[in-house]
Image (cartoon, rainbow, N blue to C red):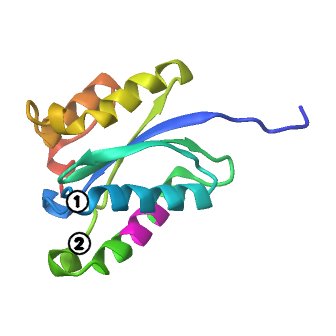
């Protein structure tokens, strides 16, 4: 085969350091747009970006030109620096060290888009920590709770 062809959908989830509620309605859409710009620059087209006060969900296509860890490093580093330029409490902004990344079938992207769009409603019923553990369990990911949170 002479071409390398991919279409890898990935659902990425990570939180703010210590789950501090930095992402409010005043900064959320601007932050999501900024991260979308990072993704586009790295040839990882964003499908949907959203989240809630202490975490973010990203659905994007992973480029064949970048590793997942490099993508996360670029997103976190650039957006963290950008958030700190917004002043006030955001001068102390940090993302957590870790992340969750889950592959998504092309046939299920609409479900993930809807899920991301409904984060505020979803989190009236369940905490981020419980949500994240559900993801890990549903995906059959082995984990040690002592090391899941920072």
- Residue 93 against residue 51 in the figure, above or below: below
Which is the main secondary structure of the residues drawn in magenta? helix
State the image coordinates of residue 113 (x, y, percent, origin top left): 40, 31
* For residue 102, side relative to residue 127 (left or right): right
Mark-to-mark CA distance, 2 and 1: 8 Å
Looking at the image, the residue that sits furthest to the front is 26
Residue linked to disc 1: 16
Query: Which residues lie in the magenta part?
Result: 74-79
Q: Is residue 75 magenta?
A: yes
Residue linked to disc 2: 93
Q: Are marks 2 and 1 in contact (CB under 8 Å)?
A: yes
Q: Quadrant of the N terminus?
A: top right
Q: Quadrant of the C terminus?
A: bottom left
Question: Between residues 43 and 117, which one lies in front from this camera angle?
Answer: 117
Secondary structure category for the residue under label 2? loop
State the image coordinates of residue 85 (x, y, percent, origin top left): 32, 81
Looking at the image, the residue that sits furthest to the top is 107
Q: Which mark is residue 103?
A: none
State the image coordinates of residue 142 (x, y, percent, origin top left): 30, 33
- Residue 103 against residue 12 in the figure, above or below: above
- Residue 147 against residue 47 in the figure, above or below: below
* For residue 8, side relative to residue 14 (left or right): right
| Occupied quadrant, residue 58 | top left
* For residue 47, side relative to residue 138 (left or right): right
Question: Which residue is drawn at the image coordinates 20% and 56% (left, top)?
Answer: 25
How many residues crowd mark 2 within 10 Å: few (<14), some (14–19), many (20+)? many
How many residues crowd mark 1 within 10 Å: few (<14), some (14–19), many (20+)? many
Secondary structure category for the residue under label 1? loop
């Amino acid at each position: 085969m002479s071409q390398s062809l991919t279409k890898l959908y990935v659902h990425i989830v990570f939180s703010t350091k210590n789950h501090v509620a930095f992402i409010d309605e005043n900064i959320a859409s601007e932050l999501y747009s900024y991260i979308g710009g990072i993704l586009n620059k790295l040839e990882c087209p964003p499908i949907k970006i959203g989240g809630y006060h202490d975490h973010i969900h990203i659905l994007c296509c992973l480029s064949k030109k970048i590793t997942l860890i490099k993508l996360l490093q670029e997103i976190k580093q650039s957006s963290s620096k950008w958030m700190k330029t917004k002043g006030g409490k955001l001068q102390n902004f940090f993302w957590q060290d870790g992340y969750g990344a889950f592959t998504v079938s092309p046939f299920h992207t609409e479900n993930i888009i809807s899920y991301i769009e409904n984060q505020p409603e979803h989190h009236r019923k369940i905490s981020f920590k419980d949500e994240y553990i559900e993801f890990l369990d549903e995906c059959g990911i082995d984990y040690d709770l002592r090391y899941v949170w920072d």
